[in-house]
Image (cartoon, helix red, strand yellow):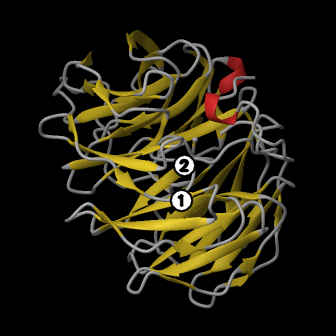
Amino acid sequence: MHFPAPYQGFPMRTHITRALCAATAGVALVSLGSAGAASAADAGPVHPGTAYVVNQDSGTVTPIRTATDKAGTAINVKTYPYAIAVTPNGKTAYVTNTLLDTVTPIQVATNTAGKAINVGEDPQVIAITPNGKTAYVVNVGSGTVTPITTATGKAGKAINVGSFPWAIAVTPNGKTAYVANSGSGTVTPIGTATNTAGQAITVGTDPSAIAITPNGKTAYVLTTGGTVTPIRTATNKTGQAIKIPYSTTFAPSSSPGQVLIASTPNGKTVYVASQSAGTVTPIRTATNTAGKAIKVGTDPFGIASTPNGKTVYVASQDSDTVTPIRTATNTAGKAISVGNLPWAIAITPNGKTVYVVNNGSGTVTLIGTATNTAGKAINVGLAPVSIAITP
């Protein structure tokens, strides 16, 4: 199993044996959007935007034009970049630099890196509010979250949360950011209007992933002990923990693609990956009951969905595969072979193409959703770990 360089030699804990997914954003919510994906019969209008791939060992970010699937000149962001998130207006991407304790902004229009922003110790994951005004950076080493005002690129006062904060998700209305603290067994709510932390919410052992339903009513928190704890956001009270197959979570998830929890757009079902079990479990949110676990590949590490919500794609690191799951029936299709150690996954806005980041191969594999077949691999940098696609 591959361990990114910053965590080689890191003190061993139950899940801190390697450092991640996504979003979008801490463990970002993957919204299985309501917009219809193009059919296989459609003539191929190009999909817009740019995919940004973070190459940890190269210290770079590779831009890929999704219209042509051509990689551009790598952008130097210095030592050990890890997570990436893009503002909702698509103008700026923010990249965490784990060993430098900084965040580097990238101007999308020119693909140039701006001046690094100092944050806390060992920044890992990052989430941006829906209005795009604030980026929240989770600093694992200092037990803090640093807010960055995107209009000025200035970091605000660090917000104390719990021990080893490992994931973050922001409510759809942008009023609250929830931070999962793996060392404390808690979730800390942060009021975004004042950037103040509320009372910590006790969940379970080593919470390491968190997602919020599209209606903003419930946050679901994955723990390494094989439970998912629902939190009512109106009261910050927990419900009964939901048992799923045991999941040893080795890494925080970040930005679109590198996530372990996904919700359908109507909020009726939440999908949770269990890394140790090699399964994905659907949870009905109306009853908070788990359905039958769906077998995927070994060590599933990333989930993404087509915008129409019909298919969830699951990247499994140790199988070198991506498994499509039909959400209507919760059945897995034939596994798709990709590169070595698929680490992160994202889908173009029109739903036509899946981008799979292969950490061990230094490539990105393209999968056409109409046929679920893998196309050519695109060479990027060394040890790519995360990806974000502009709106």
Q: Is residue 209 visible?
A: yes
Looking at the image, do the residues carrying marks 1 and 2 touch, with CB atoms under 8 Å apart?
yes
Q: Is residue 374 above or below residue 228?
A: above
Quadrant where the N terminus sits is top right
Query: Quarter-wise, where is residue 302 in the image?
Result: top right
The amino acid on which the numbered mark 2 sits, given as a three-letter code, is Gln
The amino acid on which the numbered mark 1 sits, given as a three-letter code, is Val
Q: Is residue 248 above or below residue 265?
A: above
List the single residue furthest toward the left: 109
Q: Dot 1, crowdedness within 10 Å: few (<14), some or many (≥20)? A: many
Residue at screen point 56% across, 89% down: 234
Residue 285 x, y percent position in the rendering: 65, 69
Q: Is residue 1 above or below residue 377?
A: below
Label 1, on which residue? 138
Residue at screen point 53% across, 41% down: 99
Checking the image for residue 363, the label placed there is: none
List the single residue furthest toward the bottom: 235
Residue 239 x, y percent position in the rendering: 76, 79
203 displayed left or right of 235:
right
Q: Dot 2, crowdedness within 10 Å: few (<14), some or many (≥20)? A: many
* Element under disc 1: strand
8 displayed left or right of 247:
left
Residue 233 x, y percent position in the rendering: 58, 82
Query: Quarter-wise, where is residue 71 in the image?
Result: top left
Residue 32 x, y percent position in the rendering: 45, 52
Checking the image for residue 124, the label placed there is: 2
Report the Cα–Cα distance between label 1 and label 2. 6 Å
Residue at screen point 62% across, 91% down: 235
Q: Is residue 288 visible?
A: no
The answer to which of 201 and 381 lies nearer the viewer is 381
* Element under disc 2: strand
